[in-house]
Amino acid sequence: MLGMVKRFYSVIGERGGEHVVRTSLRRGYWLFAGYVLVERASDALRKAGPSASDIGALVDVALTFNEKNIGIAPTQKKEEIEGLLNVVGAAKPKTVLEIGTSQGGTLFLFTRVVGDDALLITVDLPSPPLGAGYLPWRAKLYRSFTVGKQRIQLIRSDSHSAQTMSQVLGLLGTRKVDFLFIDGDHSYEGVKNDFEMYSPLVAAGGIVAFHDIVPGRPEDVGGVPRFWNEVKGRSGSQEFVKSIDQGGCGIGVLRL
Ligand SMILES: C[S@@+](CC[C@H](N)C(=O)[O-])C[C@H]1O[C@@H](n2cnc3c(N)ncnc32)[C@H](O)[C@@H]1O
């Protein structure tokens, strides 16, 4: 609490009171307007979503969808996420675990290429002001992504906590994870922890993918490139990288 108050006054000092009032009004608007608009956005997305047979069109929808200023853009490069979706689509996983839900872009894309009875679990931090995750009304939009008999479970807590792990285990029951996507805490310790905690839940032959394996600005890629360098030597590893000079992004895939 004290930290939040200090941050509030330091932002006023840095950017002025007017900025703070405008930002607060915008945040306040979205906190409530989202509840009204989310149904409309879910319907529009359902109508816009092309079939999984056209991965390029699917990714275009995710990147450009905008209904009343509600978008789901994944923080991914088109060519790279298409490469991953082709791998995942061929494997047709029945159980998916994603660390890092954010605007729901990759979650949406995964629903379109996995089995139509798949269980998808996605983890992100709690909502602001207590956490840095997505606004609460977005949960309704994310649950509407399902096709067929799919189920989506949203976990709102730190992926590194024991409580999150026990929630994941409770949801999995006797299932193993067929596809684990790690795109949450990008610090070296963060990505390493996610891998060490959740990869033992992955089935033999299952897929583990990491985003941001290409070196770039530390605030974007953190320690992911370093961690990827340590694990990429395993057999069957694969990289989807548009350009090695792009600074950030890039997807690394392991087969366990
Ligand atoms: C790069 S975004 C994920 C983007 C998303 N996969 C996509 O492309 O559509 C990273 C997300 O990880 C979340 N995150 C960061 N640290 C986390 C942690 N320790 N536990 C859970 N989520 C975390 C952030 O809140 C953020 O929403």
Image (cartoon, rainbow, N blue to C red):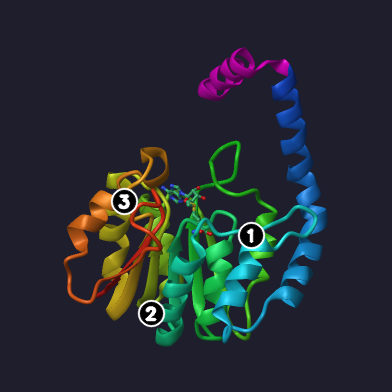
Q: Left or right: where does residue 73 sit relative to residue 21? A: left
The residues bearing labels 3 and 1 have C-alpha atoms spaced at a distance of 23 Å
Secondary element at image label 2 = loop
Residue lying at 33% horizontally and 75% vertically, measured from the top left: 207
From this viewpoint, which residue is outermost toward the top? Answer: 13
Residue 224, disc: 3
C-alpha separation, residue under disc 2 versus residue under disc 3: 28 Å
| Label whose residue precedes the other's in the sequence (2 or 1) | 1
Q: Secondary structure at mark 1?
A: loop
Q: Would residue 112 appear left or right of 99 to someone viewing this image?
A: right
- Cβ atoms at labels 2 and 1 below 8 Å apart: no
Find numbered disc 3 in the image and state the secondary structure of the residue it sits on: helix
Query: In the image, is residue 145 above or below residue 147?
Result: above
Q: Amino acid at mark 2?
A: Arg
Asked if residue 3 lies in the magenta stretch, the reply is yes
Q: Which mark is residue 185?
A: none
- Decide: few, some or many residues near mark 3? Use Cα within 10 Å; few <14, some 14-19, many ≥20: many
Q: CA distance from mark 2 to mark 1?
A: 29 Å
Q: Residue at x 20, y 61 (%)?
A: 231
The range drawn in magenta is 1-17
Residue 181 % position (x, y): 40, 65
Chief SS of the magenta region: helix
Q: Position of residue 139 (x, y in %)?
A: 64, 59
Q: Is mark 1 within 8 Å of ligand 1?
A: yes
